[in-house]
Image (cartoon, rainbow, N blue to C red):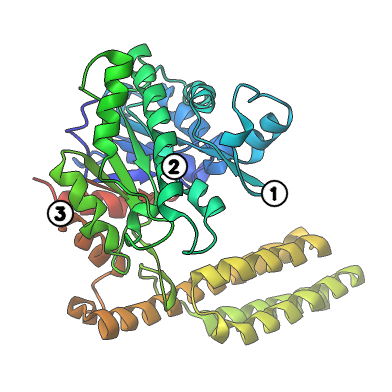
Amino acid sequence: MSIEKLSRVGIGMYRMCLGSKLNENALYKALNREIDGSKINVIDTSTNYCDGESESLVGKVLKSSNKNLLSRSELFLATKYGYIQGNNMTLYQNGSFKNVPDEHIVHYGPNCFHCIHPEFMKDQINRSLHRMQTKYVDILFIHNPEYFLMDKIKSSNENVKGYQKQMLDRISQSFESMEEAIYKGQILSYGISSNSFSLTEEDKHFLPFYDLIDRAKEASKRVRKTENHGFAAVQMPANLLERCGLETTARWAKQNGLKVFINRPLNAFNEDGAFRLASYPKTDYEHIKSSTISNLETLRRGGESNFDGQIRFIIDLIKQMDNVLPYIKNVFEWENYQISVNSTIRQFQVEADINSILQHFLNTFETEVRHRGSQAVRNYLIEKYNIEELKDENKRIEEVALEFLLNSGVVDVVLMGMTREEYVDFAKGMLQKFKN
């Protein structure tokens, strides 16, 4: 579809995977033309999201027989390439990328390589089109090319300008390969999605953007004999706390006719820590905790003796979690702690009836963590950023966060994770509010 007809809020597929009914239902709801008049027509995914299963979920929905869904021609479909992880790592180890010079593969970490070489792009776009069951994507983003800088530059004393030029030269090569993909009809346009677009120009991992359009023109002249290049958009993180990219990269992009996509609008990071910019309801945590322990005790007294050890273990776990609760500052810390909790439960092989009782407590515990964290975030935003409207407890933090971006004057599309149907409802509500 035309890049001029994008919905102001798009679907960020980062944590949306084939096999998750929750994610699948949310995507169906987002693309259902019959649910109010607010169409979400932008889908943004990547080869490395859920190790390709994010793209596969898109493919399943695109091929659905549901006539109420937006058709492929009504959708703006974006994907990205660059990461060698998971299945791509296996392919690399098996020699599938033998046409890619090894010096063009950034060995960033043992389980994370990166590459933007033309031969790798050709491989990746074919795999993406196959997974998404489509003949073309509307835009292909180079995904975080600054991995080259992150690997090469460990301190500001190194040859930063020299390495930046090497990275830009590699981007130029990628532009040429994507101009070829436009000629073949595999993509309609291309762009760069980079975390470095949100850094200050003085940062050693900053991605200089000033001559990207000239490089795109040169690539198009060499490949398609025209200056009418396909470089159409940039994508970067931005939110209430991380605003640098809005003033630099995004402003430059808008002045030069490029579209600006914003990701990570509700997950913010600064010198004070990590913040989830969303409101969560208060729970009846104390009551649920007490009743869970009581129910487990009842089950232990009336059950078989071989469950006694499991129940005692679960009750001890609940008490331990209750002691830890005041020290969990935000949802990110909870997600790390949750991994160890789930691992412990799996290792103990908890019986189904006991696990069912436990899961109700775990869900309540998570909601309580999110509520306490959101109250702390609200106070932080009021005190440090003087966001007066958040003094109204009925004003949701995520609403303020999206309004800030959509009112910035330099943002075309805010990409929002829509892993659940309630997130789709919120996104459509925001679209209604900003309807032209």
Q: Secondary structure at mark 3?
A: helix
Horizontal side of residue 338 vs 203, given as left or right: right
At x 47% / y 39%, what residue is drawn? 24
In-front residue for pair 14/420: 14
The structure residue drawn at horizontal position 24% and vertical position 33%, both measured from the top left corner, is 214
The image quadrant where one finds the C terminus is top left
Tags 3 and 1 touching, CB below 8 Å: no
Q: Which residue is mark 2?
A: 167
Indicate the amino acid at tag 2: Met
CA gap between label 2 and label 3 equals 41 Å
Residue drawn at x 21%, y 81% as measured from the top left: 386
Q: In this orientation, which residue lies closer to the viewer: 222 or 411?
A: 222
Q: Secondary structure at mark 2?
A: helix
Q: Amino acid at mark 3?
A: Lys
* Residue 62 falls left or right of residue 304: left
Q: Which mark is residue 110?
A: 1
Q: In the image, is 283 to the left or to the right of 5?
A: right
92 and 59: which is toward the camera: 92
Q: Residue 141, located in which quarter of the rendered image?
A: top left
Can residue 20 be seen here? The reply is no
Eye-nearest disc, 3 or 1: 1
Callout 1: SS:
loop
Look at discs 2 and 3 and give the one toward the viewer. 2
Placement of 28 over or under 356, stated as above or below: above
Residue 146 % position (x, y): 45, 48
Which residue position is annotated with label 3?
Answer: 433
Q: Amino acid at mark 1?
A: Pro
Local packing at callout 2 (Cα closer than 10 Å; few below 14, some 14-19, many 20+) is many
How far apart are labels 1 and 2 at the CA level? 22 Å
Quarter of the rendering occupied by the N terminus = top left
